[in-house]
Image (cartoon, grey):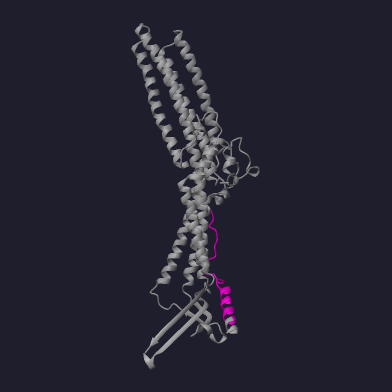
Amino acid sequence: MTQPFLRTTTSLLALGLLAGCISLDPDYQRPAAPVPAAWPQGAAYAQPASAPPASAATPAAETGWQDFFVDADLRAVVGQALDNNRDLRVAVQNVLAARAKYQVQEAAQLPTVNASASGGYSRTGAGSNRQETKSLSAAVGVSAFEADLFGRVASLTRADLETYLAQEETARATRISLISEVATAYITYAADKSLLRIAQETMESAQHSADVTRKRLSNGVATRLDAAEADTIYQTARADVANYTTLVAQDLNALETLTGGPVDPAHLPDGIEGRTFTLAALPAGMSTDVLLNRPDVLSAEHSLKSANANIGAARAAFFPTVSLTTAAGFASKAFGNLFQAQSQSLSFTPSVSVPIFDNGANQANLDYAKATQQAAVATYEKTIQTAFKEVANALARRGTIAEQLDAQQAKVRSAQTSYDLSQARYKQGADSYLNALDAQRTLYSAQQTLVSVQLTDAGNLVTLYQVLGGGVK
């Protein structure tokens, strides 16, 4: 049995080596990016003076989040979210599931070797006609191994591999998105704390002014109009205090949902003023090629490659399928003779299946695979277009925010000066109380707007880091 068995095994291994050598997959070519090669130009896209040149800076995709976020408290909160967030856990499990599915498909490219043993006993008749039959067997063999001569199994394996890689990139995108969401929620909390403080200070100041005005009214110095106007500012600030108190609580709820548990109060900011949350700037003069490294773009490309491989599998279904079944072992009627040379057994059963008539099923499967591949091309192109829009919008905001912030800070300084002078003139009787109240309203509004611009400035850097495919190291 030895020589035939070796010949059979050699033939099987040769077919296994040949398996998958032929690929019917379409030649993959990455679709051209349907976006301009350069970012938009114009007044809105002026590069900040602090932005380092692209050649001298680390790309956003290679800048780890711990390097980008320079605020230690914010880093601690982001770290808590990465450890506990449920969406991220789901993404990780999806990756593990895709990897397991790929490993199952990959295993089909090699024969599965099984060992088997069986025994049997039968008896017929009785007395002198009684006959007994015993049988024992032990064998090692391969059952229904598909010799992948036309690459069907290899194409399916490539499809599952690309699906697994797509899930990995999706998980990376989820991680980057989570980091961005946590940072945005944290900065929003800081901004609302500042707005709450400004409203409380304005309410206290307005209450004092209202009390003074009512006393002046009782002494016949102020008018009822002055008292009503003073109370209007007080009630406005009072309503804002109630509103911002609610917003701060809701901001904390949102932050703790992202972090998966309570946030240490020691890590929460008291306000947005004077805090630096991130690096001051990201590289300037980047090519749009950076979009190709975004995880969502990479995921879309892997999905396209998977669809491409499925076309190869659908094409292979038109060709014959070669299946091999072989077994080598021993068979005997008595256990004592089971492993003797004369008990050796060998079976080798190749089979070929040729599609003749399938009522159009194979062609429909091929049409489906081609349509899915074209849809994947469109999805890939749309993903790049969306990425371009997101980066362009963030760059447009980055190009003007410094000027807006500087103007708003100057406005607050001027409003503060106007308020101080109006109060002094009113106390000296040189100006009306309405002018002083108008100056107070202007200052209050300017302070609120400044916080909003500061929030936009900090949030824009976080957004720009995310849309450029920020690193997750």
At x 53%, y 80%, the residue is 329
Instruction: Tell which of 188 and 291 is nearer to you.
Output: 188
Q: Assess whether residue 455 is covered by the magenta stretch.
A: no
Q: Report which quarter residue 277 is drawn in.
A: top right
Please, is residue 254 above or below residue 315 in the view? above
Q: How many labels does the image show?
A: 0
Please, is residue 241 above or below residue 12 in the view? above
Q: Decide if residue 346 is in sight here.
A: no
Q: Report which quarter residue 123 is drawn in.
A: bottom left
Q: Where is residue 103 in the image (x, y as percent from the top left)?
A: 52, 63
Please, is residue 188 above or below residue 310 in the view? above
Q: Assess whether residue 21 is covered by the magenta stretch.
A: yes
Q: Where is residue 330 in the image (x, y as percent from the top left)?
A: 53, 82
At x 56%, y 84%, the residue is 340
Q: Decide if residue 425 is in sight here.
A: yes
Q: Where is residue 65 in the image (x, y as percent from the top left)?
A: 56, 42
Instruction: Tell which of 231 and 108 is nearer to you.
Output: 108
Q: Position of residue 122 (x, y in %)?
A: 41, 84
Q: What stretch is highlighted in magenta?
A: 6-33
Instruction: Tell which of 157 and 330 is nearer to you.
Output: 330
- Indicate the quadrant containing the N terminus: top left, top right, bottom left or bottom right: bottom right
At x 47%, y 55%, the residue is 379
